[in-house]
Amino acid sequence: MTSGLSPLRATTVRLTAEHVRIHDLVSFGGRNMAVTFSEHRGGLVRIELDRIVRAAMPPATALVVTRPRHRR
């Protein structure tokens, strides 16, 4: 018997900054913003959110990330 509900389209998880990927959603300033750029350089992780916000942080920084599931 099926419930009639569609499968989840995203999952929210707690990750360290080094595991953030492009297209993940990160909450910043009360908004969920898409990661549009991410790089690891000089012992820091640099991310760009919606091409508006740029942030640099240590790789072990904990973030709450919503990761969209991609259709197969």
Image (cartoon, rainbow, N blue to C red):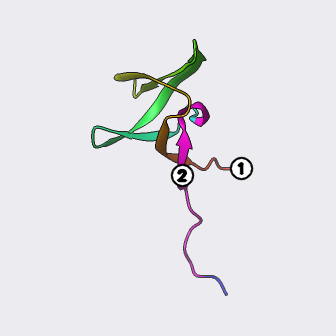
Q: Residues within 10 Å of mark 2 (few under 14, many from 20)?
A: few
What's the mark number on residue 72? 1
Label 2, on which residue?
13
Nearest to N terminus: mark 1 or mark 2: 2
Q: Residues within 10 Å of mark 1 (few under 14, many from 20)?
A: few
State whether residue 33 is above or below residue 45.
Answer: below
Amino acid type of the residue tagged 1 in the rendering: Arg
In this view, the residue in front, 65 or 18, is 18
State whether residue 41 is above or below residue 28.
Answer: above
* Percent x, y of residue 38: 54, 23
User: What residue lies at 28% left-to-right and 43% top-to-bottom?
Assistant: 30
Left or right: residue 62 versus residue 18 is: left
* Percent x, y of residue 28: 34, 37
34 falls in the magenta region: no
Left or right: residue 39 versus residue 51 is: right
Q: What is the distance, in whole Å, between disc 1 and disc 2 at their CAs?
A: 21 Å
User: What residue lies at 54% left-to-right and 54% top-to-bottom?
Assistant: 10
Residues rendered magenta in the picture:
3-19
Q: Quadrant of the N terminus?
A: bottom right
Amino acid type of the residue tagged 2 in the rendering: Val
